[in-house]
Image: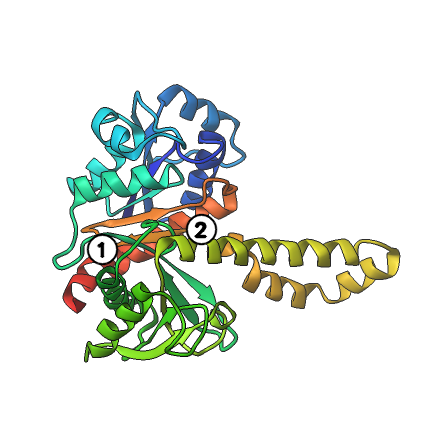
Amino acid sequence: MVTLAVDAMGGDQGPRITVPAVLQALSARQDLRVLLFGRQQEIAAAIDSAPYPSSDRLQIIHADDVIGTAESPSLALRAKKQSSMRLMLDALDEGRVDACVSAGNTGALMAISRHVLKMSDGIERPAIVSALPRRDGRHTFILDLGANVGCDSEQLHQFARMGRAVARVLDSLENPRIALLNIGSEDSKGNDQVKLAQELIRADSQLNYVGFVEGTDLFSDRADVVVCDGFVGNVALKTVEGLARFILAEIRSTFSSDWFGRLLAWLIRPYWRRIEGRINPGHYNGAALIGLRGVVVKSHGNAGEAEFMQAMLLAARYAEKKLPEQIEQEL
């Protein structure tokens, strides 16, 4: 049995999305148990109106406070000790749950996670990591995706070491290839921060460094782990997701424009589902904050029910893999 703590109040729509997603996840996995943190009255109303049956594996933990999406992380850390997000993380620190999931304020989630769970030895800051699909059927792990707007070269080196551990644990890669995201593949390109990070990573005998890569290489097989600061990583990720949604919408619109297109869409439906499953950003929702002594998964704030459920299933997988402990051993 895997026990998740879920921040019911996080995200753009709060319990209207998180509660049905939790019920759907409990129906999908019989070995899952959930502690749902938030305002009990709102959660109960969402359960009553959800299209999925309730479960005896769901427990509601009332929380008076909610951390707003625009709230200052430092203020949230000091003043919101009874918020749904804080109580969720306290439950993880106390060992009552195996992992946490929230679609709430990213800055607050990172600040409170660092304070409550603490960092692994040798790591200064957590990083958000996610896996992108690539042409050879494997994944490219990219970090940081927004936890740290600015990073120095030493922190990028630490991200590379954590990324190596993630790829070894999750994709069973013996010696994953590490790259730095840059504006060009030549050694002369980039700012001083990236150039110095390259020297540190290249000098680390444990890392299989393959050089700089560009944004066009993220879906190729040039590297297994791509490292960047959170500003660059978040812009790259949002651009990729926006382009994927645009392409999917254009294809749907084209096939539904006339009767022949609809007929063709019906004929190729099995192939279309396979393609959509590979490139739909919603199927990859959820990114882990690594470097912490606990599994914390951040969902997009605008995630729908199916997307939030994906983040929950990802958190369960990371908990089963004991990802924080494995990263500490690798480091």
Query: What is the x, y in percent for residue 131?
Result: 41, 63
| Residue 29 visible in this rendered orientation of the protein | no
Residue nearer the viewer, 182 or 120:
182
Quadrant of the image occupied by residue 54: top left
Residue 30 percent location from the top left of the image: 37, 48
Outermost residue toward the right in this view: 259
Q: Name the mark nearer the viewer: 1 or 2.
A: 1
**Percent x, y for residue 71?**
35, 29
The C terminus lies in quadrant? bottom left
Is residue 111 shown above or below 62? below
Left or right, residue 240 beside residue 177 = right
What separation in Å lies between label 1 and label 2 (alpha carbons)? Answer: 22 Å
Verify CB contact (< 8 Å) between mark 1 and mark 2.
no
Mark 2, residues whose alpha carbon is within 10 Å: few (<14), some, or many (≥20)?
many
Q: Which is more toward the observer, 203 or 309?
A: 203
Locate residue 312, reporting x and y percent. 38, 47
Quick one: SS at disc 2?
helix
User: Residue drawn at (40%, 40%), measured in percent from left and top?
Assistant: 103
Question: Which residue corresponds to the image point at 31% horizontal and 76% vertical from the top-left?
Answer: 176
Q: Which residue is labeled 1 in the image?
A: 291
**Amino acid type of the residue tagged 2 in the rendering:** Gln
Numbered circle sitting on residue 310:
2
Does the image show residue 186?
yes
- The three-letter code of the residue at mark 1 reads Gly
